[in-house]
């Protein structure tokens, strides 16, 4: 049986953090076994919010090394950089003719970004969902593993696909659906007491943080007064620390700390040390691989080149069909 196609991407806006790892990357690694997976680094998309030319190439390079260090294997999935496949731009141009201003303006992420950067509400930001749809539809991907914040973009990709098929009387574009990771979706909290871990929140533990940095960041995590009465409600900062502990420690260890919290014998200093050690155990092997990979320009270039070649051969076919359906003919 043909494997179902999975596509996903992460914007090239800085180093990957623990939230990216548990929310996205870890699933990508697992999915390579079962699906025809294609993963890319969305460098065009990052230009919508971060137009600093001096940062972009290094971000792409470090994320590629981080992808590989986390276990993405170019022999088992297609790994590429968005701008290495310029066919995507033409696909996007063509798809733009079937995306309407009204629906683009109503996108939650667009409104949010327009509020955050009022002096740079550029057309790329407005048509972000069209470029994302082009990324996906050119692969005829069935599934896209994304976080909650991206569900609306995915719904728009389905709308564009259905609208296009209806307009040209074909079933060429495949409407993509969110991929539900096995088990509960994970939201990695920040260390600042509330909310999620995220780059714009500035509260991240990065996958390439060294041990001392991890210890320092965790030591500074927000807590509350130690509980004094059994069965008192647990505050949000402490709930968040337990979420982190459950992600990185054995279940029995996390249960012990919970019991200690319940009988008020817990010491937050110990809890934090346990969390820091757990995080270090998860990320330090990745960091070591990352450092080797990041330094290996020839290997990174080879991965990029081969990924781009494989993907371009596939999307070229989709693009030719798209052009044909829309009436474009070469001289
Ligand atoms: P950031 O919020 O740091 O800018 P992105 O929005 O670029 O991160 O997220 C890239 C991927 O990582 C998305 O699939 C997103 O859902 C996932 N992700 C980011 N932060 C978290 C988090 N704290 N918990 C779980 N998943 C996350
Ligand atoms: N918008 C996604 C994010 O911010 C990144 C992205 C761009 C993407 N194109 C995609 C994700 C296509 C999945 C499929 O996380």
Image (cartoon, helix red, strand yellow):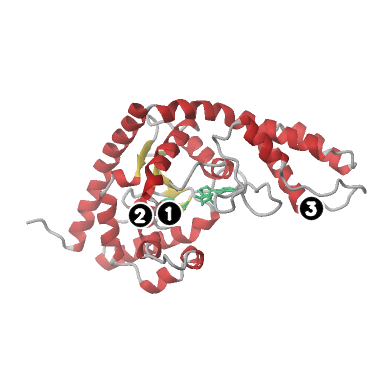
Direction from residue 251 to residue 142 in the image, left or right:
left
Is residue 255 visible in this depiction of the protein? no
Of residues 297 and 277, the one drawn nearer to the viewer in this rendering? 297
Kind of element beneath mark 2: loop
Label 2 near label 3: C-beta < 8 Å? Answer: no
* Residue 38: image location, x then y, percent: 38, 41
* Residue 166: image location, x then y, percent: 30, 66
Q: Is residue 265 above or below residue 103?
A: above
Instruction: Using the rendered view, name the quadrant where residue 165 is placed.
Output: bottom left
Q: Badge 3 local density, few (<14 within 10 Å), some, or many (20+)?
A: some
- Which residue in the protein does label 2 denote? 174
Residue at x 56%, y 39% (from the top left corner):
206
Q: Quadrant of the C terminus?
A: bottom left
Direction from residue 242 to residue 140 in the image, left or right:
left
Choose mark 3 or mark 2, whichever is in front: 3
Q: Which residue is farthest front?
A: 54
Q: Is residue 133 above or below residue 80?
A: below
Cα gap from disc 1 to disc 3, whole angstroms: 36 Å
Cα gap from disc 1 to disc 2, whole angstroms: 31 Å
Q: Is residue 45 above or below residue 163?
A: above
Kind of element beneath mark 3: loop
* Residue 273: image location, x then y, percent: 74, 33
Direction from residue 90 to residue 192 in the image, left or right:
right
Choose mark 1 or mark 2, whichever is in front: 1
Q: Which mark is residue 235?
A: 3
Q: Is residue 89 above or below residue 65?
A: below
- Which residue in the protein does label 1 denote? 50
- Chain-order first, disc 1 or disc 2: 1
């Amino acid at each position: 049986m043909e494997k179902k196609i999975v596509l996903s991407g992460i914007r090239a806006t800085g180093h990957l953090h623990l939230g990216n790892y548990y929310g996205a990357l870890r699933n990508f690694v697992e999915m390579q076994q079962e699906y025809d997976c294609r993963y890319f680094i969305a460098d065009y998309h990052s230009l919508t919010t971060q137009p600093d030319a001096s940062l972009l190439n290094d971000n792409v390079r470090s994320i590629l090394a981080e992808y590989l260090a986390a276990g993405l294997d170019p022999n088992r999935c297609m790994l590429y950089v968005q701008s290495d496949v310029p066919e995507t731009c033409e696909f996007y141009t063509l798809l733009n003719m079937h995306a309407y201003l009204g629906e683009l303006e109503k996108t939650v992420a667009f409104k949010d970004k327009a509020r955050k950067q009022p002096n740079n509400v550029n057309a790329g930001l407005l048509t972000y969902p069209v470029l994302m749809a082009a990324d996906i539809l050119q692969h005829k991907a069935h599934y896209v593993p994304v976080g909650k914040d991206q569900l609306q973009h995915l719904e728009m990709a389905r709308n564009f696909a259905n609208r296009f098929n209806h307009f040209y009387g074909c079933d060429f574009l495949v409407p993509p659906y969110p991929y539900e990771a096995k088990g509960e979706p994970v939201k990695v909290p920040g260390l600042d007491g509330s909310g999620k871990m995220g780059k714009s929140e500035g509260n991240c533990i990065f996958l390439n943080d060294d041990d001392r940095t991890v210890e320092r960041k965790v030591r500074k995590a927000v807590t509350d007064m130690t509980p004094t009465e059994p069965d008192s409600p647990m505050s949000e900062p402490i709930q968040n620390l337990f979420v982190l502990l459950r992600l990185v420690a054995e279940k029995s260890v996390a249960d012990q700390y919970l019991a200690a919290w319940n009988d008020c014998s817990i010491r937050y200093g110990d809890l934090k040390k346990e969390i820091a050690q757990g995080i270090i155990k998860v990320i330090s092997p990745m960091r070591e691989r990352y450092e080797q990979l990041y330094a290996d320009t020839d290997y990174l270039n080879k991965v990029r080149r081969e990924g781009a070649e494989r993907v371009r051969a596939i999307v070229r076919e989709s693009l030719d069909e798209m052009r044909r359906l829309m009436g474009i003919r070469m001289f």
